[in-house]
Image (cartoon, grey):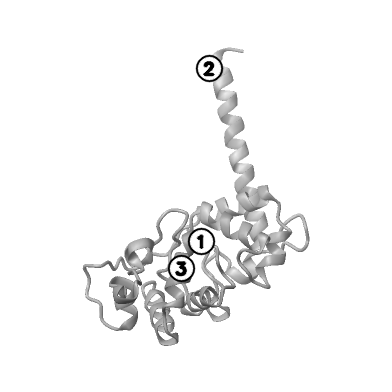
Amino acid sequence: MRTTDRLLAGACALLLAMQAQAADGQKLFTQGGANPAAMACVTCHGANGEGMAAGGFPRLAGLSAGYLNKQLEDFRSGARANPIMQPIAAALGDDEMQALSAFLAAKPAPAAAQANRADAAEGVGARLALRGAWERNIPECVSCHGPGGSGVGDAFPALGGQSAAYLSAQLNAWRQGTRKNDPNDLMGHVARSLTDAEVTAVAEYFASLGQ
């Protein structure tokens, strides 16, 4: 076989493998995994991974594959506690987690207002998000999560447009110690420094950016 033929054959094989992975990810999302305990994600997270605000289920579409895969691994290990997600993650294989994460990461994320530290900060939520509370060693949320909480890399997920119920629940999980899978306990420190009213305010602020 000529070199060009071998290269073409290799490229075709790679393309087919990528297509197979995407198809597997879609099947996992809509139908569930090989283990029946790995239920279909679409049931709680919406037809396009847009989330279900009323139930507190987050948007998954457009989040980074590395972040999504880590959350599944942490649910499986117990580093992140959740009575619904832990048994589902435990029933997924490593390849299923990777395929599902890649599928969701490739889906479009909704546009959110790109608020940053230069913008006016009116109200408790906006001040925490854009200015922080440095007298209590609380950095502004956008310093890690990007303008408008749009997300940065695999460690800092998008906040803009997530439901207020979900964001509040996660801040409270860090406060209570049931979630502790963030880098260097940064979110644990921030959440434990917030009052109940501040948790509600900052969650509602980021939720409003996607409306």
Q: Residue at x 50, y 80 (%)?
A: 165
How many C-alpha atoms fall within 10 Å of the one at disc 3: few (<14), some, or many (≥20)?
Answer: many
Q: Residue 118: percent from the left, percent from the top?
A: 21, 67
Give the residue pinned by disc 1: 61
Q: Residue at x 44, y 65 (%)?
A: 186
State the SS at label 1: loop
Please state which amino acid type lies under the numbered disc 2. Thr
Please state which amino acid type lies under the numbered disc 1. Ala
Please tell me in which quadrant of the rendered image residue 87 appears: bottom right
State the SS at label 2: helix
| Side of 48 relative to 33 (left or right) | left
Q: Residue 171: percent from the left, percent from the top?
A: 49, 75
Q: Residue at x 34, y 76 (%)?
A: 136
Q: Residue furthest top?
A: 2
Above/below status of 144 relative to 123: above
First of labels 1, 3 by sequence position: 1
Split into 4 quadrants, where in the image is the N terminus? top right
Above/below status of 172 relative to 90: below
Above/below status of 29 relative to 133: above
- Whether residue 136 appears in this view of the structure is yes
| Side of 198 relative to 171 (left or right) | left
Give the residue pinned by disc 2: 4
Q: Nearer the viewer, mark 3 or mark 2?
A: 3
Q: Residue 198: percent from the left, percent from the top?
A: 39, 83
Please state which amino acid type lies under the numbered disc 3. Met
Q: CA distance from mark 1 to mark 3?
A: 22 Å
Give the residue pinned by disc 3: 187
Split into 4 quadrants, where in the image is the C terminus? bottom left
- Whether residue 211 appears in this view of the structure is no
Q: Residue 18: percent from the left, percent from the top?
A: 59, 40
Instruction: Name the one closer to the observer, 78 or 99.
Output: 78
How many C-alpha atoms fall within 10 Å of the one at disc 1: few (<14), some, or many (≥20)?
Answer: many
